[in-house]
Image: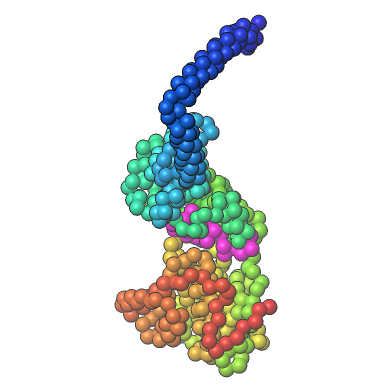
Amino acid sequence: MTDETRAKSAHARHHWRRDLVELAALFTAVAAADSVANTVAHGPDGPVLLVSSAAALLATAGFHTWWARRHHAAPPRPGKALPVANGEVGTAPSSVTGQSTALWRMRTTVRDEPGSLAALCMALAHHHVDILALQTHPLADGAVDELLLRAPDALTPAELADAAAAGGGSGTWLERADAHDLVDAPTRALTLATRTALDAAELPLALRQLFGRCAIRSVPAADGGPDPAVPPEGVWEETVMRLPDPSGGTITIERPHLPFTPTEFARARALVELDARLGPRVPPRSDVLTLPEGNEITVRRAGLDDLTAAREMHERCSAATLSRRYHGPVGDADRYLRHLLSPRFGRTLAAYTASGRLVALGHLLWDGEETEISLLVEDAWQRRGVGGELLGRLVAMAADAGCESVYAVTQASNTAMVAAMRALDLPLDYLIEEGTLVVTARLAPAPAGPATRTGSSARKR
């Protein structure tokens, strides 16, 4: 016989005893009620007393009903413990307090044990911190949890770090987040992969957006092939990654403030392998612009296919023009073109006349965490609005890539470049050192479409 069968038998045997007790209680209650009723009814004020008692009972019942309904509909008070399905204790969301909140990105290391994540969540919930997203990066002896938090604005970074420590977290890193971080990790990875597939120049930008604040440098190999010091699968050491560049050389990613995880290394390798499989590619889009004087030029992305045309333009440029652009011996100008036109080091815009002659080049170059901008316009086409058109588009591309600023290095006597930078209508910083002028423009949010300048019109093709 099972325990369940024995329990049912015992329940049946004692069932008649419980029925007898209930009947005895019922008879006792009826007798007591009859005795009280006879005593009250035969007294001098019996009827009045009965009516008053009934009214008091009705008033009490009505008040109890109103009180129960009022408190049942009210929301829970801030910070009040709420029961949850598994018997643990939750915390009311901080949004019910009406306080302003802030978004934070947190990364902390926890033990690889059951319940470690729950302890961290409970410690954060104690401070009314809402976890909006969570990624887990497994390690050999633990796990790194990356969380997107919405915390009360009054909560300081030190208090957040203390809360993580109380929940078992160690090595906690915090950074303010914004609305862009609300995109979930798979969606972000797919978006970056799509951008990389469409444009080879997007790979460094995709890596930067994938890892946040980091410095990315492309180092070409001496012979144009792969770097023998970097294996085909890449190498990762704490805060530095080195991956083979599909176009030759090495891509180095540095993030001194936060070590990389094996998961991040795998994501970087996947993007690089995608770029290698697709090969060189440049978006075919171009814009036909009408300059104020009436001439038409075509502006499009340039690549290594434009190398011959760029060298021919160098031959038509004066020594002074080449010197202002390259800040070195004029004879070395052609040496820089292959580097400048490679999509791995940035983006290049080319301006062609209706007859197919290249008359201007504009470069947007990734320089670690910074971005350099430069222009070269053939002498016969200077001061005709071509440089301004290219510069406006390069700045829009930099803003779209998430750059906070761009800088131009030129000679202090190059008034045309200074005037073009001023025409951007952006905050500018100037630094002059030994005749070299560095103009830095702090960028506004990315515009909705390609930048155009007053006095010209554009059409796409």
Q: Quadrant of the N terminus?
A: top right
- On the question of residue 321 being in view, the answer is yes
Q: Is residue 114 above or below residue 208?
A: above
Please tell me which residue lies in front, 92 or 270: 92
Q: Is any part of residue 262 visible from this angle?
A: no
Which residues make up the magenta segment?
197-223
In reply to whether residue 215 is colored magenta, the answer given is: yes
* Residue at image point 57% right, 13% down: 23
Residue 126 or 313: which is nearer the viewer? 126
Which picture quadrant has residue 433? bottom left
| Residue at the bottom extreme of this rendering | 293
Residue beneath the point at 36% across and 39% down: 165
- Coloration mode: rainbow
- Residue 379 image offset from top left, x and y in percent: 51, 88
Quadrant in the rendering for residue 4: top right
Q: Residue 91 or 430: which is nearer the viewer?
A: 91
As for residue 99 lying within the magenta part, the answer is no
In the displayed structure, would residue 384 be above or below residue 236?
A: below
Q: Residue at 54% across / 58% down in the picture?
A: 206
Residue in the image at 39% along x and 36% along y: 168
